[in-house]
Image (cartoon, rainbow, N blue to C red):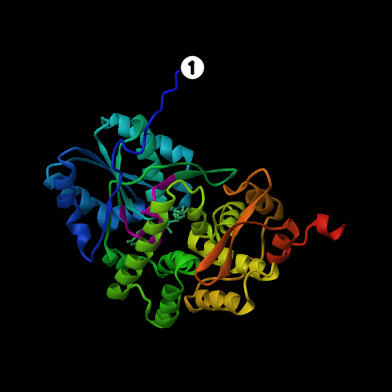
C-alpha cells in the first residue's frame, strides 16, 4: 500500500513576540497596522474595557487606516459561553469577516479565551492578536495559545490551541484594575513560580509587601519573568502532552470549585484555594514536605489570596467536575502536585476520599464505609 506522509511542522513558523512595555497600549494600533497591513479588524472586548480603553483603541486603529469593528460582550466569566460566541460569529459574518481578517482580544482572560476561540474557529481560523489588560491575562492566558469557552458540564471543556501572532502587554493598564482582580492575577504568578522557579518564588516572597497595582516597574518585571517561564514551557510542549501539565497546578480543584459554584468564585481566587488544597494533598501523600506546604499557603495569604475551601460546596457537582478534568484518563483523575517549591510531579492519582477530606466534605459514601 502506498504511504504518504503529511508533514506539518515545517509548513509555517508560528513563533511570535510578546512585547511588554508601560504605555504600549496607545502605540499598538500603529504597530499593528504596520505589522499586519490594513486588514479588516474585529476588536473583541468587554463592557468595562470598552469604556476604559476599547473606544480609543478602535479610533486609533481606524486612524491608522484599518477597517475596524469594536464588538463588546458583557464583562464576566458567563460570556465565555456558547450563546455569546454564537452572537459574535453572527456579528463577524455581518461585518464581512474574511480569511485575512484579524481578531484582537482586548481585555482579561475571559476575552482572550473567547476571542481566541472565535479566531480559531471562524472560517476555520483567522489571525489573532492578544492585548491583555488584567494581570492574570498578562502573566498567563494571553501566551501559549489555549483558547476556549465553558460548558454547563464544566470549565474550559470546549476549546482549541490557537497561537496569537503577537501579544502586546501594557503594565500601566493594571492601574485601572479593581484591587481584587489584581490579586487574582497574583495567583497565577505564584502558580508559575511554585511550579517552575524557586528563586522567582523567593523573590515574590521578599517583594510581597511592595506588590501593588501602582508599582508599575515591579509589575513589569513580574510579568516579564512569568511570561518567559510560560514561554519556555509552551515551546517544549505546546499541546500539553507532558511538561505543560505543570501549569495546571491548583487547577484541578480550582476549576471544579469554579464550575460547581456557578462561577461565583473568580478564577484567581479558585486557583489560590486549589493550590493550597492540592499542597495539603501532596503533604498527606508524603510528596511535599510540610514546611514547603506552609511556605506556599503563607505566600498566598501574604498576597491576600484565599486559601481555605468555601463554606458551601455542592459535593456532587464538585466531584463530577473533578472527574471531568481534562487531565483525566482511563485510570481516573490525575493531579499535578508539588514536590518542592519550583518542582511538580504531574499525573499523580489521588483517592476521592482524600479530596473530600481536604475540602471539608464528608460524603455519604465515606461515612458508610
Ligand atoms: P476577566 O477577563 O473576567 O477580567 C476580570 C475583570 O477585570 C472583568 O470585569 C474585566 O472587565 C475587568 N478588566 C479587564 N481589564 C481591566 C482593566 N485594565 N481595568 C479595569 N478593569 C479591567 O478575568 P481574568 O481574571 O482576566 O481571566 C479569567 C479567565 O482566564 C478565566 O476564564 C480563566 O479560565 C481564563 N484563563 C485562561 C488561561 C489560558 O491559558 N487560556 C489561563 C488562565 C486563565
Ligand atoms: N494556563 C495553563 C496553560 O496555559 O497551560
Q: Is residue 179 left or right of residue 131?
A: right
Q: Residue furthest right?
A: 368
On screen, residue 177 above or below 14: below
**Which residue shows up at 52% across the image and 72% down it?**
341
Q: Position of residue 51 (x, y in %)?
A: 29, 55
Q: Which residues are drawn in magenta?
A: 131-147
Relative to 202, 332 lies left or right:
right
Q: Residue at image x 39%, y 67%?
A: 178
Q: In this picture, is 311 found above or below 289?
A: above
Q: Outermost residue toward the front? A: 1
Label 1 lies in ligand 2 vicinity (Cβ under 8 Å): no
Whether residue 75 is visible, yes or no, is: no
| 159 falls in the magenta region | no
Q: Mark 1, residues whose alpha carbon is within 10 Å: few (<14), some, or many (≥20)?
A: few
In which quadrant will I find the C terminus?
Answer: bottom right
Q: Is residue 321 visible?
A: yes
Residue 65 position in % (x across, y down): 12, 42
Rendered location of residue 4, percent (x, y): 41, 23
Give 187 or 134, whichever is nearer the viewer: 187
Q: Residue, x 54% and y 74% (percent of image)?
A: 296
Q: Residue 259 placed where, x, y %?
A: 58, 51
Q: Looking at the picture, does residue 117 appear above or below residue 194?
A: above
Tell me the residue that label 1 is attached to: 1
Using residue 209 as the reference point, say whether residue 164 is left or right of it: left
Give the image quarter of residue 283.
bottom right
Look at the numbered disc 1 and give the secondary structure of its residue: loop
Amino acid at each position: 500500500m502506498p504511504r504518504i506522509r503529511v508533514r506539518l511542522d515545517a509548513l509555517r513558523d508560528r513563533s511570535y513576540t510578546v512585547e511588554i512595555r508601560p504605555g504600549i497600549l496607545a502605540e499598538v494600533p500603529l504597530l499593528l497596522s504596520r505589522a499586519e497591513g490594513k486588514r479588516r479588524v474585529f476588536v473583541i472586548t468587554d463592557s468595562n474595557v470598552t469604556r476604559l480603553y476599547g473606544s480609543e483603541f478602535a479610533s486609533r486603529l481606524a486612524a491608522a487606516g484599518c477597517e475596524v469593528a469594536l464588538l463588546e460582550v458583557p464583562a464576566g466569566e458567563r460570556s465565555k459561553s456558547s450563546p455569546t460566541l454564537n452572537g459574535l460569529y453572527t456579528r463577524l459574518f455581518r461585518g464581512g469577516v474574511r480569511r485575512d481578517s484579524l481578531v484582537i482580544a482586548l481585555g482579561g482572560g475571559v476575552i482572550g479565551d473567547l476571542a481566541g476561540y472565535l479566531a480559531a474557529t471562524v472560517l476555520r481560523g483567522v489571525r489573532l492578536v492578544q492585548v491583555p489588560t488584567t494581570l492574570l491575562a498578562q502573566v498567563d492566558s494571553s501566551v501559549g495559545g489555549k483558547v476556549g469557552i465553558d460548558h454547563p458540564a464544566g470549565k474550559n471543556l470546549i476549546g482549541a490551541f490557537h497561537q496569537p501572532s503577537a501579544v502586546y502587554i501594557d503594565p500601566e493598564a493594571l492601574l485601572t484594575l479593581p484591587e481584587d482582580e489584581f490579586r487574582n492575577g497574583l495567583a497565577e504568578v505564584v502558580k508559575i513560580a511554585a511550579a517552575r522557579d524557586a528563586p522567582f518564588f523567593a523573590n515574590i516572597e521578599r517583594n510581597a509587601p511592595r506588590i501593588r497595582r501602582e508599582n508599575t516597574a515591579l509589575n513589569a518585571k513580574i510579568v516579564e519573568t512569568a511570561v518567559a517561564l510560560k514561554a519556555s514551557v509552551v515551546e517544549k510542549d505546546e499541546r500539553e502532552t507532558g511538561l505543560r501539565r505543570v501549569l495546571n497546578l491548583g487547577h484541578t480543584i480550582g476549576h471544579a470549585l469554579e464550575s460547581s459554584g456557578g462561577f461565583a468564585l473568580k478564577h484567581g481566587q479558585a486557583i489560590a484555594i486549589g493550590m493550597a488544597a492540592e499542597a495539603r494533598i501532596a503533604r498527606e501523600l508524603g510528596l511535599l514536605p510540610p514546611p514547603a506546604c506552609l511556605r506556599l499557603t503563607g505566600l498566598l495569604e501574604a498576597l491576600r489570596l484565599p486559601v481555605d475551601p468555601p463554606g458551601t460546596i455542592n459535593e456532587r457537582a464538585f466531584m463530577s467536575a473533578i472527574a471531568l478534568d481534562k487531565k483525566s484518563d482511563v485510570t481516573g483523575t490525575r493531579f499535578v502536585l508539588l514536590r518542592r517549591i519550583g518542582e511538580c510531579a504531574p499525573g499523580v492519582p489521588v483517592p476521592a476520599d482524600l479530596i473530600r477530606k481536604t475540602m471539608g466534605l464528608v460524603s455519604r459514601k465515606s461515612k458508610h464505609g
